[in-house]
Amino acid sequence: MPTSQIQIIMPSHVNGVNRLFGGQLMAWIDVSAAVEARRHTKRQVITAAIDNLTFLGPAFLDETVRLDAQVTWTGNTSLEVRVDSFVESLTGGERRINRAYLVFVALDDAGRPASFPPFTPRTEEQKAEWSQAEERRKHRLLARRAG
């Protein structure tokens, strides 16, 4: 079951043209993803990478933002979480404004990487996400080696 977070955009969250600061949204995304990762692993986690963060549209002062986080892939000590961010209309509609993929590492009590139960994709959508997550992981590993 995905983790959801709801925020109302307040004056402290916006820039001079009343648009949500991208950095504020990134902070909400990181927290939502971390909660989902902690729920799955039953461990403390640290953010290892933000693999992709795409801004698809703006959000404005006084709008409601919903962030939905779900595990897309697990390894032995790391996992990927996707967060989709939506602006909800007061009349019931919504529009997606962001999609992000974050990688976390689970930690044991001494702060070392620790294993946890795997995520098993069941639906066709989850299987497709898993496959795409493996491709993103390959690219991250190649970039690290080239680093």
Image (cartoon, grey):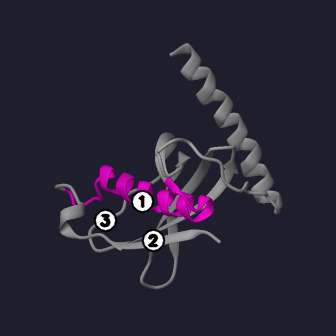
Residue picked out by circle 2: 5
Tell me the kind of residue under disc 1. Val
Tell me what residue is drawn at x 60 percent, y 46 percent: 114
Q: Earlier in the sequence, mark 2 or mark 3?
A: 2
Q: Which mark is residue 31?
A: 1
Query: Which image quarter holds the N terminus?
Result: bottom right
Magenta stretch: dominant secondary structure: helix
Report if the CB atoms under discs 2 and 1 are less than 8 Å apart.
yes
Residue 55 in view, yes or no: no
Q: Magenta stretch: residue 26 in it? A: yes
Report the magenta residues as a range: 17-44
Q: Secondary structure at mark 3?
A: loop
Residue at image x 69%, y 48%?
74
Alpha-carbon distance for marks 2 and 3?
17 Å
**Horizontal side of residue 133 vs 93, given as left or right:** right
Crowdedness near tag 3: few (<14), some (14–19) or many (≥20) residues, C-alpha within 10 Å: many
Residue 75 image point, x, y percent:
69, 44
Q: Magenta span has 65?
A: no
